[in-house]
Image (cartoon, rainbow, N blue to C red):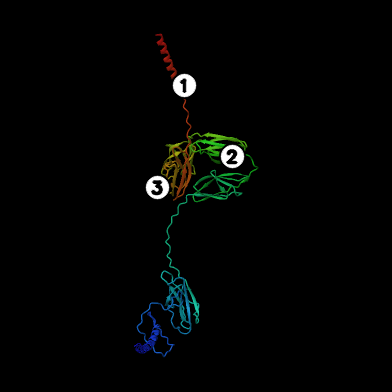
Amino acid sequence: MLTKNLIVLVPVLALCLVALVPLAACAGSAGSIPLEPGPVIIDTTKVTTEPTLLPTLTEPTTERTTEPTTERTTVPTTEPLTPIGGGQGWIDVHCNVDGASVYFNGKYEGQTSGGILSVAVSSTGTPISTITVTKSGYQEWSGAPAHMPAENEHVAVYATLNPLTTAPTTVPTTIPPVTTGQIYAQSSPTGAAIYLNGNFQGYAPLGIPNLYPGTYSMKASLAGYTPDTTLVTVYAGQTANYYPVLQLSPQPRQTGTVYVNTVPNQASVYVDGSYYGKTPITLTLYPGGHTIDIRLAGYNDYTTNVMVNAGQSQNIQVTLSTAIFGSITVNSAPGAKVYMDSTPIGTTNSAGVLQQTGITSGNHLFKVTKSGYNDWMNTIYVQANTMTTIPATLTPVGTNPTPVQGTGSIAISSTPSNAGIYIDDLFRGYTPTTVDNLAAGSHTVRLTAAGYVDYTTTTTVVSGQTAQLQVAMTTAPTPTATPFSPGPAPVLVIGLLAAVFGIAAISKRRS
C-alpha cells in the first residue's frame, strides 16, 4: 500500500516544482517595481529580450528601500534634467536671508535655502544681465554676474538684503535751565591746596562744580609760599577762574594761634583784611601785630588788634551787640526824588543812584517820583549793619505800555522748614516755596526762623529760569540765664516781724 502511494506522490511533487519556477521569477520582477507613487522613469538604454511578467497579487510594504541622508544638496529643484543647450554651468546666488526670491532677467528661478540658490544656465545661451533678489520686509537687491559661466563652471554672486528701516520719531526734550556755575582753580606753581569758604577742595588744577550763584572766598596754600586769598563771584551757567600766582615766603617762620568765638556764632572773621572763615575758628598767624574784624548781619562790627607770639595761643571771646542802623542804596531814574516814611531824603544822581546811611532798622515806606513817570512805592525792610538795595524802576506815563522786563524764579528750601523769606527785604512767604516774577539780576535773600540765626545771601536770577537755594540754618546760641538774688528786702521783712513779736512778749510779761 505504501509503495502505491509513493508512486502517485512523486509525479505530483515534480509537477509542483516545475510550476514554482516561473512564479519565483515573477516575484523577483515584482520586487523592482516602486511601491510609492512618483514619476516612472523608463531607461531606454537597456534592451532585453526577456518577456516581462506581470506580478501577481503581492502584499504592499511600508519599509523604505533606501537609507535617508542628512547631507544638503546644492542642486536646486529648478535645475533641468537635461542640459540647456550647449555647455552647462551654474550661477550660485549667495544671500544672507533664506527664503529670498531670485529672478534672472525678470524670470523667477527659485528661493534661497541655506544661504544659496544654484541655477543651471547655458554657457552659450542668452547672457544673464540682471539678477534680482527680493523678500518682504527687506530692501530689493539687484546685480549681475561677473561673467557667464563656462561649461561645468560655478560663478558666485553675493546679494545682501538690508531690513527696511523706519525713521525714528523725534521726541522733543526739554532742556532744564542752568542754575549753577563752577570755579576752575589753577595755581602757579601748580599743586597748591585750594579752599572754598575755608573748606578744603583739593589741589590745583581742579574744577569746583555745582556752585550756586554768589560770591565765594578762595584761598590757595603751598608749602614754602605765601598763601593767596581773594573773592570770586560765580554766575549761573558760567565758569569763574581763580589763578593765584604764589610768591615764595622769605623764610620759614614759626606761628602762633588765636581762637576766636562769638555770641552769636557764624560771624565772619577777617585778619588784616583777608577772610579766614566763620566763628568759632582757630587762626594760625605769623608772629607780630594783626587786626581782626568780626562781622555779622544785624550786629555791629567788632574790631580788635592782637599781638601774636611764636608758639603761643590766645583766646578772643566776643559778644556782638545788636545793630540799630543800616544803609540803603536806591537805584532809579536820574533826578528822581526819594521819600522815606513821607519825608524827602534826597535825589538820585546822574547815574540814578542815591545812598543813605544811619537808617533805623525795620520796615520803611519808600516812594520815588519823577515828572513824566508813574510814582513807585513799596515797603522795604532795612536790615541793621547791612546795605539794603532798593530797585525802584519808574514807568513812563502814557498810553504805550512799558516793555515787560524778563523775569525768573527762585526755589527756596531750608532746614528747618517754615522759615520766613525776605527777598530784597520784601516778605515773600515761608519755606519751602518758589518765588516767581523776579526781575533778572541779583537779589538779596534773607531767611528767618525762631531759634535760628538769620541767613542772608545774594542770588542771581536769569530770565526764564529757576534758581535753586537750599539752606541749612544754624541754631541760635542759648542766652545765659542770670542767677536770681533775693536782695535785702526779704531779710528786712523777717527782721521787722521778729521785732514785733519781741515787743509783744515784753509787754505781756509786764502786765
Q: Which mark is residue 102?
A: none
Looking at the rendered structure, which numbered label has been put on residue 284? 2
- Sequence-earlier tag: 1 or 2: 2
CA–CA distance in space, label 1 to label 3: 76 Å
Q: Does residue 178 sit above or below 155 in this rendering? A: above
Residue at 47% across, 31% down: 481
- Foreground: disc 1 or disc 3: 1
Q: Looking at the image, which is closer to me, 229 or 419? A: 419
Question: Residue 110: image x %, image y %?
Answer: 42, 76
Per the image, the residue denoted by label 3 is 398
Q: Amino acid at mark 3?
A: Gly
* 326 to 212, vertically: above or below: above
Image side of residue 243 versus residue 75, left or right:
right
Tell me if I can see residue 301 in this picture.
Answer: no
Q: Quadrant of the C terminus?
A: top left
Up-down relation of residue 5 to residue 441 (above or below): below
Q: Position of residue 277 (x, y in %)?
A: 54, 41
Which element type, helix, strand or loop, lies under badge 3?
Answer: loop
Do the residues bearing badges 1 and 3 touch, measured as CB atoms within 8 Å? no
Mark found first going from the N terminus, 3 or 2: 2
| Among the 4 quarters of the image, the one containing residue 48 | bottom left
Q: Quadrant of the N terminus?
A: bottom left
Q: Residue pushed farthest bottom? A: 49
Asked whether residue 168 appears in the rendered view, the answer is: yes
Whether tag 3 and tag 2 are in contact, CB under 8 A, the answer is no
Looking at the rendered structure, the kind of residue marked 2 is Thr
Identify which amino acid the numbered label 1 is placed on.
Pro
Q: Residue at the location (42% across, 11% down)?
A: 506
Mark 1 or mark 3, which has the lower sequence index? 3
* SS at circle 1: loop
Q: Which mark is residue 488?
A: 1
